[in-house]
Image (cartoon, grey):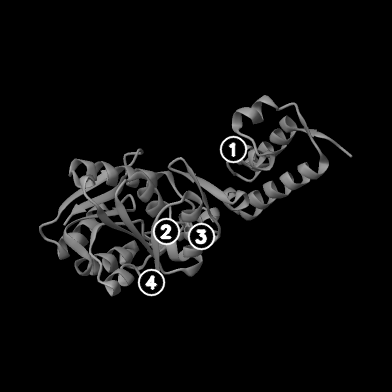
Amino acid sequence: MAKHTIWEARRWASSFLTEYNRETNVADLLLMHHLQCGRAQLLANARDEVDEEFFNKFQRDIHIHAEEGVPVQHLIGHEEFYGREFIVNQHVLIPRPETEELIVAVTEHLKKKAWLERKLNMVDVGTGSGIIAITLALELTDVEMRAVDLSSDALHVAKQNAATHKADVCFYEGSFLEPIMEYGDKMDVIVSNPPYIPESDRSSLSDVVVNHDPELALFAEDNGLAAYRAIVSQVPHVKAEEALLAFEIGHNQGEAVSTIITETFPDATISVLQDINQKDRIILAWL
């Protein structure tokens, strides 16, 4: 039976991925997954041999990613977010680094407001894999965290992630803030990374995103603003006397989303924050 070194597998995969205009680092991610090792060990053992069965499995995954656009995270079954691994699949968005910046913005502004000195009621709207709710529940010390999603399949993934990380999060199935309204709870912090991509942008997106991320979590009507309008219209029914509303937004939606908020909350103090690439990405509104 033929043998291949790890170095040979990496070289073949890099060339194949380049041919299909895919990121070559996918090769290392898949090798580390199959070998159950870290990057340093992968590089240190580059001359080690792998058997034909291993190489065939690795080739199969490379072909699936390159030819069909299946995200490497779906092949591996997880993605890292804020230093923790989260289960992901076709029912939830793959976590993006920009959303980590939303977590940082929320926690830093709560500290500035000295709100972390008291127990906070928080809700993550459109939780998907649960990354925002779970991370905030783990990073903040005294929080009663809730999370809502319309998709029962997404909630199944989120509950698995919460159990894995031993995060105390209450999950609800429903449209945006409707379950919170139904129970009459009042929230100090409302955070959301809702669908915000206009349908007109579909053709500009990678096939990895369009064909494998759930449409419900990607696209929104009204030029990408429909979810913001829906959530803001519900906020008066669930917010505490003073509350923080935090959104992740598209890079060109800062002014439009700010206007949506001020139409309902004319006295809101609104900040539009940029991500690491100097693009508008986060809105914080003190209501």
Mark 4 and mark 2 residues within 8 Å of each other at the beta carbon: no
- Residue 77: give its label: none
Sequence order check: which comes first, mark 3 or mark 4?
A: 3
- Residue placed under numbered mark 1 in the picture: 25
Rendered location of residue 73, percent (x, y): 57, 49
Q: Residue at x 69, y 34 (%)?
A: 10
Q: Nearer the viewer, mark 4 or mark 2?
A: 4
Secondary structure category for the residue under label 2: helix
* Mark 1 Cα-neighbour bin, 10 Å: few <14, some 14–19, many ≥20: few
Q: Label 4 to label 1, Cα distance in Å?
A: 38 Å
* Mark 2 Cα-neighbour bin, 10 Å: few <14, some 14–19, many ≥20: few
Toward the viewer: 230 or 220? 230
Sequence order check: which comes first, mark 2 or mark 3?
A: 3
Q: Label 4 to label 2, Cα distance in Å?
A: 27 Å
* Mark 3 Cα-neighbour bin, 10 Å: few <14, some 14–19, many ≥20: many
- Residue 201: give its label: 2
- Residue placed under numbered mark 4 in the picture: 174
Q: Which quadrant of the rendered structure holds the N terminus?
A: top right
Q: Is residue 274 visible?
A: no
Mark 2 and mark 3 residues within 8 Å of each other at the beta carbon: no
Q: Amino acid at mark 2?
A: Asp
Image quarter of residue 8? top right
- 145 shown above or below 272: below
Mark 4 and mark 1 residues within 8 Å of each other at the beta carbon: no
- Residue 157: give its label: 3
Q: Nearer the viewer, mark 1 or mark 2?
A: 1
Q: Amino acid at mark 4?
A: Gly
Rendered location of residue 117, percent (x, y): 21, 45
Sequence order check: which comes first, mark 4 or mark 2?
A: 4
Q: Amino acid at mark 3?
A: Val
Q: Label 3 to label 4, Cα distance in Å?
A: 16 Å
